[in-house]
Amino acid sequence: MPFPKGIRCITLLSVILSSASGAMIELHDTTSIETDVLLFERATVFSEGDTIDRSDVRVLTLSTRASKLDMDIDADQDIRELLDKAAQAQERFPDAKGVLLIDDGLNTLNEDGTRSYAYHFAYLVLSESRRSQGTYSGYFKEGENEIKILFARLIKPDGRSIELGPDDIIIQTSPTKGSLFFGRGKIVTFSMPEVEIGDIVEYSYENVRFNPWDKGVFEISYFFQGCDPFIYSRLVVDVPEAESLLWKAYRMPVGTEEPEITHRNGRKVYTWVAENVAPYVPEPYSPPSGDFTVKVQVSNQLNWDRIFDWYAGFQKERMKITPRIQELTDSLTYGAETYDEKISKIYHWIQKNVRYISVKGASSSGVSGHPAEFTLNRGFGDCTDKSILFSTMLEASGIEAYPVYVGTNQSVSLLDPQIPQYYGNHCITEVFLQDTSFYLDATGSADGGYSRYPSFSSADHGVYALNAQKRKIEIIGVPDADQHLRKYDIEIEVDKEGNLVVDSELQPRGPYEASWRASLSRLTLKEDQTTRFERMVNSIAPQAELLSFAFGNPDDFTTPFRFRLSYKLNDYVKFAGPVAIFKLPEVAGHLDFKEVSLRERKLPLIYSTSAAVSHNVTVTFPEEWRIAYLPEGLSLETEQFSYRAKYENQGNVISFSDSFERQKREIKPGDYPEYKSSLTRVSSYHTKPILFIIDGGSK
């Protein structure tokens, strides 16, 4: 909320107030002291009747309504210190686009379970792309938390300071694109005016959470590294003396892994500091930043029991098998003879008939969903809603199933099970059959709702799943590469003029199948379908001519999906006197490994899931042409992938077949050079042409 006129947070200054001024001292024990006389020197604060240790002060604010504010040091000292820090940072990191000079976070847990986060930020802008650092936005919800902007200013290189006024702070309700909000959430935001290269943006705010989801759970993830250098980064965790904490430091600079722990006045304070941390350089196909950056995680949960109980309590309340749910389930599974048939019918119905809409609201809706029948009646819901409904309908059919929380593999850092915490940005379903269990994702947000059983979104592969009702956490395995096969069958006719007629059929599996089903289901008009496939064949060769196309019903999940293309490539074969030069169309494009474009990597290369590609190609060429050169076969077997390819010839027909399989999701930096070299061999193999000699001379 906007601060009153003339109020400013005092952090490092040592000041004496005249009696005409006012001050408010807020302590960690939630008590407050108002005073007109204040002496603030180093580690001690003196008011009219109190002597207070600085470590006990949570927030100190001054009202400058008085005509005079006497300071025992130069009021511009903190500005000069920031400018000096900025100059030193530029010398240390001359190529930086911006520098985070101060990154100071204080997390406070009170005796009653309420908590606050106070943050001090100072950032040096060194490029156009970093001018956006002058804008701040914070989300709050009336009845749950409050954000106080303590101060904000813009410091120019010459030392001038432009203070943010209370009228510059805006509070608004602003729904996120693609989401529905059913709560009282609002955004407090401000933008510093006239941010220019060389300026320092500085501000401080406090987020007070007086009604957290669970007052008994206190957890923190704090990052000491980003895309810009961090000059001074500090995490302070202030808890009651009796509170027990688990914590873990990841990749902290040597000597800073252990926190400094102090005890005072019934409080326990943990402090981590990292200085001059170099930025990480983003690389394509990198894991989420939390998997490789410098960070600390803290939790007051010594095991997962309380979090399991909290999640499971919400879920059980909402998984009620009502008469309507039972009736619908029975009608969908009527005639199904096996559990797989039952699961498949319910899975596909949920994907197609309950729209995915991200619904933001209270914790009971945003984290643990709405009652199953409520979601069924309105016909839409977020991932948690759909998982609860799916799990409930499976239970109604006699199949054990539960909602589980995951952190998708391209967005969320991999969970550390040793540090119990709230977890996940997505909710899917774990299904139990006899002695096994497996996962399904009925949400449809990533694949358009077209995953054919038992396939599920690749974003869920290789991540931890938290099943609260079964009280377990485990890694979701990466499906076998064969389940993600893209199988191409291609027949090619070559005429004497070097023109080709190609009949190509693709049968994709897994996420590829879901993607094609979703894509083609949206193209209901023949002209839109034609345009789509024309673009596809033009990507093979610019002058390609689409002859025909056909594909299966995207909504028919009883059989694998496939589509067929027929197209003509005019003047495709190149001639050099009596020699005809021919390369297989399509194949090289399906084996184009853009992810290994870097010479070396400092970060792992991460795929969403496993992959497999195979080709069976037949080429019929004119009888007057004789094969002068046919590439030999290729066989590669590495730790990361396998590839086998071979050509065969009989009469005027050439047959080509190959298979590529990669099971691993992660390629470590140390393995990258060999991996890149091996994939390059595969790509280079398909640059080799087939050479023909034309009997009777040149074309």
Image: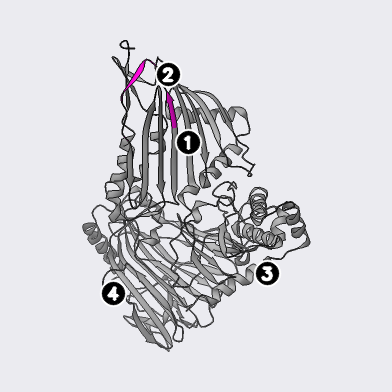
The amino acid pointed to by label 1 is: Tyr
Q: Is residue 512 above or below residue 76?
A: above
- Badge 3 local density, few (<14 within 10 Å), some, or many (20+)? few
First in sequence: mark 3 vs mark 1: 3
The residues tagged by marks 4 and 3 sit, at their Cα atoms, a distance apart of 61 Å
Q: Are marks 4 and 3 in contact (CB under 8 Å)?
A: no
First along the sequence among labels 3 and 2: 3
Residue type of the residue flagged with mark 4: Ile
Whether the residues at callouts 4 and 2 have beta carbons within 8 Å, the answer is: no
Q: Give the range drawn in magenta.
A: 617-632
What residue does disc 2 label?
499
Q: Residue furthest top?
A: 696
Picture quarter containing residue 67? bottom left
Report the front residue among 240 and 462. 462
Q: Where is residue 547 in the image (x, y as percent from the top left)?
A: 53, 22
Disc on the earlier residue, 4 or 2: 4
Q: Disc 4 marks which residue? A: 73
Q: Mark 1 points at which residue?
A: 488
- In this figure, which residue is indicated by the disc labeled 3? 317
